[in-house]
């Protein structure tokens, strides 16, 4: 079976090839209900059509952006020109001076003439009644949405519950059974009269209705879970200026006139116009397909929704939202065709196909045997030429029996159980602060053998404060974090240097000090910037004072490649001079300096001894687990060749700042859990190597392995890489490219399933390359989130471990359900087939088999596929990349339980009357009821057995699994009702207390059988994985029991 599944039903978890997707689709056969079974499978034809539409739209946008003078004027000839737009009465009464279509057309068409006609960006701001300083008033948002529209894209309407009912009724076998039951009602009334003759047919119809509704309710609830997750995925927070203060709002609440703040890694949330900013570089490839980034400034101010900020920062005036943007129109084509199916869904489609073929063969043989025996009897009685309605009814029952075998034999619920389990896990993970963007990630995480994690914010709290400062050759601890520290520092250095230091903090920053709703100062920006600005406020500094006094000329924002931020300001008293400030990674900034401020506050040349002393200070701070930043400045004469360029050398070092970022509570325990689970944790950070080592030791990541710096790592040869990567535990001063290289080597050279975390724009390639990419929800950029599979909403490493736990739970739960369902399949097939061949009749009726099918399909999936994870999951090795899905342990359990149940039920069938001492005319009916009852209780207890495939104690944690308990209780209750009260429809008779006890006891014996089976050793392939040096291999096989 495994070979068959590998050859025909194997797809990659991420970006599966179209060839593999088409291969497994063509291999699928014996499908009872394609509409339901393939509901969560990508529609390749629809996707291809959507791709064509998207390309055409992209081409049109590309033409609009790059070939305006020719094609664009022709395309938009009917909508161009200011004279074509008339202000409606509604817009005039609202006080706006421009209609939505004209406003949208200006940006979409890059219409500079129309923009000039409206007196530029300032004129348009007046037309939409907004000031650049105050922004939109919150009370005006609803009114603007009514006039200019909502920032939402057209979505497909949700499927109603009755659509799911209709889908469930498309099952071919159920349709055939309905037809059979209708004919049965007609024949029954003619032969047995009304109402007795209609019981059989009505019983089947009622059971089908029950099956349809239970299935539909389960599917509908899944769809609602996916809808909630989809809403959460699309809900992005945007920084805007509203009510004269900077604040965060949902992307859906964005309105025309909003002043949006853009930074590196942001996705432009609406069409708009550039107001102000520095070095803004926009990647428009998502819209136009063009890979070259575009500079946006006051001469070219047009910003399109859906594009990404590659570099720089800016403020933008929103001009159109939602479906009035090009992105809105493009979004209609992006979600066509559905999401890619997961590897488990595909694999279980293969299992269902294989078993379905076997079941179809058994059903055909059963029908032929029953019909053959019937014809032989007629021939032996010389009545082959005499046919009546009873004969027709018999043949109809034979056909119904064959169809019922197909119903039970084709495990239609297998692939759908994966979806149910994933939907349940994703919902639970969302409550636990993990937003799963791709279904397959939740499944793949169970196989992860390596996690490459960032340090800042993931292992640490990201609540940074300045802890130490070295300035004027003195180290000052910052103990209280209040004005006393500020006064102490101010009194110990010269006023000139103190003022210079404050200027470097408040002007060389990408963050902003704003007034909160409570009127208190609040810093909006990254944690590092917040720590610095917070420290500046303690020292008595003020952003407005320095920005009014010194005009900012140019900014080079921080990114993970430069590892520094620089700013150029003009000096007020001297038009011929400018001043550059630089802050960033200590080693980088120190190398740029050739002077330093000495203990007397004088600028002196930096000699070798001082340089060594400075490096010792940096290493001392880093060894105390502090992040170190250096601050430097350079005064520049205007006679330089390029007055606006920021220099890269000859700076004067002002200060070294040590920032404390404590390790998150629970991280050390989470890392230990990973190690116990056979998962190697590697820290990949841009920080100083001593800081990285200190934090890694505190977290339990760095034991006796290797810590290396990014530049050293990237210079290694392939052979050296293969030698050091197994020992590698910490990589410091790394670039995003180093992380990508590490992930690539781990996956290709060591066949590891790799999870990686990232927050920056440049982390996108590594997130894309990894088997599972985790983006940080708080610190992460929108570009990182778009390339990730899971968004960690609290930026916590413990959450990543929780996703791993759920990923393992999903995989094990599906295995448990498959084991349970295959056992029912085998027993039902053998029981009906052998009985039909030997006695000429099947012991289980159509209604009874439909009930059994519901127990093993929808209810079984609900019970077993939604079990919560337990701690034991993280004490076993990860599931390998190419591990067998149906393991030897599962085959042992399936074969053992199937043999027990089949033997017991066949003994009851052929010797039951004698064993149970049944006499009288009802003996056969009672025996068939006992067989049915015993069969159901065998499945109830086997479902309990399936809770753990290896351990003997299957009751552990049972009380915490409330869905399982509810399914068990409802199954038993409904079984009592069917046997005791619905005999007319289900062809059962009430049983005595002794016979009930007998049925339950025979079912309960399967618990004992399971214990015996679990003592039979199964050869387990040794788990091979590379761990930390000295880390012991995990126990496998019997030790786990």
Image (tube, rainbow, N blue to C red):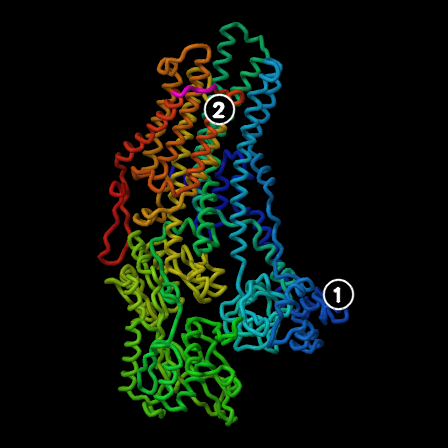
Instruction: Give the mark toward the camera: 2 or 1.
Output: 1
Check if residue 998 falls in the magenta segment.
no
The image quadrant that residue 432 belongs to is: bottom left
| Alpha-carbon span between mark 2 and mark 1 | 72 Å
Span shown in magenta: 989-993
Q: Which mark is residue 90?
A: 1
Dominant secondary-structure state across the stretch colored magenta: loop
Q: Is residue 77 visible?
A: no
Residue 769 percent across, percent down from the top left? 42, 58
User: Taking 539 as reference, is 135 left or right?
Assistant: right
Taking the spot 48% from the left edge, 17% from the top edge, the residue there is 370
User: Taking 589 as reference, is 35 left or right?
Assistant: right
Residue nearest the viewer, comparing 1029 with 860: 860
Crowding around mark 2 (Cα neighbors within 10 Å: few <14, some 14 to 19, many 20+) is some
Residue 402 percent across, percent down from the top left? 50, 24
Residue at disc 1, secondary structure: helix
Task: Relative to 118, say whether 6 is above or below.
Answer: above
Taking the spot 63% from the left edge, 76% from the top edge, the residue there is 131
Quadrant of the image containing the C terminus: top left
Crowding around mark 1 (Cα neighbors within 10 Å: few <14, some 14 to 19, many 20+) is few
Q: Which residue is mark 2?
A: 364
């Amino acid at each position: 079976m495994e070979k068959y599944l590998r050859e025909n039903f194997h797809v990659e978890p991420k970006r599966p090839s179209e060839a593999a997707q088409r291969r497994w689709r063509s291999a699928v056969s014996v499908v009872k209900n394609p509409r339901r079974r393939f509901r969560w499978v990508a529609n390749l034809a629809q996707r291809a059509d959507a791709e064509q539409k998207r390309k055409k739209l992209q081409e049109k946008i590309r033409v609009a952006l790059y070939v305006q003078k020719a094609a664009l004027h022709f395309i938009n000839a009917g909508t161009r020109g200011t004279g074509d737009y008339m202000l409606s009465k509604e817009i005039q009464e609202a006080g706006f001076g421009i209609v939505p279509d004209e406003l949208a057309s200006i940006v979409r068409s890059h219409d500079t003439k129309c923009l000039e006609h409206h007196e530029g960006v300032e004129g348009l701001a007046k037309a939409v009644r907004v000031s650049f300083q105050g922004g939109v008033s919150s009370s005006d948002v609803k009114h603007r949405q009514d006039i200019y529209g909502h920032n939402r894209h057209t979505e497909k309407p949700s499927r109603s519950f009755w659509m799911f009912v209709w889908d469930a009724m498309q099952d071919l076998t159920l349709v055939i059974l309905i037809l059979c039951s209708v004919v049965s009602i007609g024949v029954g009334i003619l032969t047995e009269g009304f109402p007795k003759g209609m019981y059989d047919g009505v019983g089947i119809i009622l059971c089908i209705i029950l099956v349809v509704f239970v299935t539909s309710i389960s599917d509908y609830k899944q769809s609602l879970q996916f809808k909630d997750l989809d809403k959460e995925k699309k809900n992005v927070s945007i920084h805007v200026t509203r009510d004269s203060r900077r604040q965060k709002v949902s992307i859906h609440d964005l309105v025309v006139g909003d002043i949006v703040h853009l930074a590196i890694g942001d996705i432009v949330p609406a069409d708009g116009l550039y107001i102000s900013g520095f070095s803004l570089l926009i990647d428009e490839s998502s819209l136009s397909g063009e890979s070259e980034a575009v500079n946006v400034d006051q001469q070219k101010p047009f910003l399109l929704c859906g594009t990404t900020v590659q570099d720089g920062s800016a403020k933008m005036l929103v001009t159109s939202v939602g479906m009035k943007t090009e992105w809105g129109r493009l979004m209609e084509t992006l979600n066509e065709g559905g999401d890619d199916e997961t590897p488990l869904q595909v694999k279980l489609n293969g299992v269902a196909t294989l078993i379905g073929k076997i079941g179809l063969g058994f059903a055909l043989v059963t029908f032929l045997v029953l019909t053959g025996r019937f014809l032989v009897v007629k021939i032996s009685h010389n009545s082959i030429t005499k046919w009546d309605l009873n004969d027709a009814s018999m043949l109809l029952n034979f056909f119904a029996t064959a169809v019922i075998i197909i119903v039970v034999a084709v495990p239609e619920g297998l692939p759908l159980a994966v979806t149910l389990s994933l939907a349940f896990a994703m919902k639970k993970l969302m409550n636990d602060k993990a937003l799963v963007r791709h279904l397959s990630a939740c499944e793949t995480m169970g196989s992860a053998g390596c996690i490459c994690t960032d340090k800042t914010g993931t292992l640490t709290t990201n609540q940074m404060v300045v802890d130490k400062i070295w300035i004027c050759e003195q180290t000052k601890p910052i103990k209280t974090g209040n004005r006393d520290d500020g006064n102490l520092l101010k009194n110990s250095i010269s006023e000139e240097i103190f003022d210079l230091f404050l200027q470097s903090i408040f002007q060389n920053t990408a963050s902003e000090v704003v007034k909160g709703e409570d009127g208190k100062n609040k810093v909006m920006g990254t944690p590092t910037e917040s720590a610095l600005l917070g420290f500046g406020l303690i020292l008595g500094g003020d952003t407005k004072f320095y920005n009014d006094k010194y005009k900012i000329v140019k900014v080079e924002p921080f990114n993970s490649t430069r590892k520094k931020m620089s700013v150029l300001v003009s000096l007020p008293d001297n038009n011929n001079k400018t001043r550059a400030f630089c802050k960033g990674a200590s080693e980088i900034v120190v190398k740029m300096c050739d002077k330093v401020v000495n203990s007397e506050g004088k600028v002196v040349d930096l000699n070798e001894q001082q340089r060594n002393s400075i490096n010792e200070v940096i290493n001392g701070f880093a060894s105390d687990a502090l992040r170190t930043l250096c601050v430097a400045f350079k005064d520049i004469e205007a006679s330089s060749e390029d007055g606006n360029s920021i220099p890269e050398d000859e700076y004067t070092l002002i200060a070294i700042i040590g920032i404390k970022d404590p390790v998150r509570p629970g991280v050390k325990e989470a890392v230990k859990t990973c190690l116990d689970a056979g998962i190697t944790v590697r820290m990949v950070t841009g920080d100083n190597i001593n800081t990285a080592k200190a934090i890694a030791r505190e977290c339990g990541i760095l034991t006796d392995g290797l810590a290396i710096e990014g530049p050293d790592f990237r210079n290694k040869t392939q052979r050296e890489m293969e030698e050091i990567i197994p020992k590698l535990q910490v990589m410091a001063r790394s670039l995003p490219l180093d992380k990508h290289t590490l992930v690539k080597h781990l996956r290709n050279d060591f066949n590891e399933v790799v999870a990686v975390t990232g927050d920056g724009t440049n982390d996108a390639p590594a997130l894309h390359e990894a088997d599972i990419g985790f983006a940080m929800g708080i610190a992460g950029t929108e570009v990182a989130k778009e390339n990730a599979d899971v968004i960690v909403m609290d930026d916590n490493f413990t959450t990543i471990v929780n996703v791993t736990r759920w990923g393992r739970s999903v995989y094990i739960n599906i295995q448990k359900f498959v084991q349970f369902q295959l056992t029912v399949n085998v027993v039902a097939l053998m029981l009906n087939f052998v009985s039909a061949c030997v006695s000429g009749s099947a012991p289980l009726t159509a209604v009874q088999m439909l009930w059994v099918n519901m127990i093993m399909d929808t209810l079984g999936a609900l019970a077993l596929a939604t079990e919560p994870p337990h701690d034991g999951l993280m004490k076993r090795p990860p599931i390998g990349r190419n591990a067998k899905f149906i393991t030897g342990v599962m085959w042992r359990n399936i074969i053992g339980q199937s043999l027990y149940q089949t033997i017991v039920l066949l003994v009851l069938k052929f010797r039951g009357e004698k064993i149970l001492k049944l006499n009288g005319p009802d003996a056969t009916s009672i025996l068939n009821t006992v067989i049915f009852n015993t069969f159901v209780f065998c499945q109830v207890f086997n479902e309990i057995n399936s809770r753990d495939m290896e351990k003997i104690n299957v009751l552990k944690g049972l009380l915490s699994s409330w869905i399982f308990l509810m399914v068990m209780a409802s199954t038993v209750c409904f079984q009592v009702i069917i046997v005791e009260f619905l005999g007319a429809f289900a062809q059962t008779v009430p049983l005595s207390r002794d016979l009930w006890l007998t049925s339950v006891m025979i079912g309960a014996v399967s618990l004992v059988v399971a214990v015996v089976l679990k003592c039979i050793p199964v050869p387990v392939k040794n788990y091979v994985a590379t761990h930390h040096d000295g880390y012991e291999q995990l126990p496998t096989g019997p030790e786990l029991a």
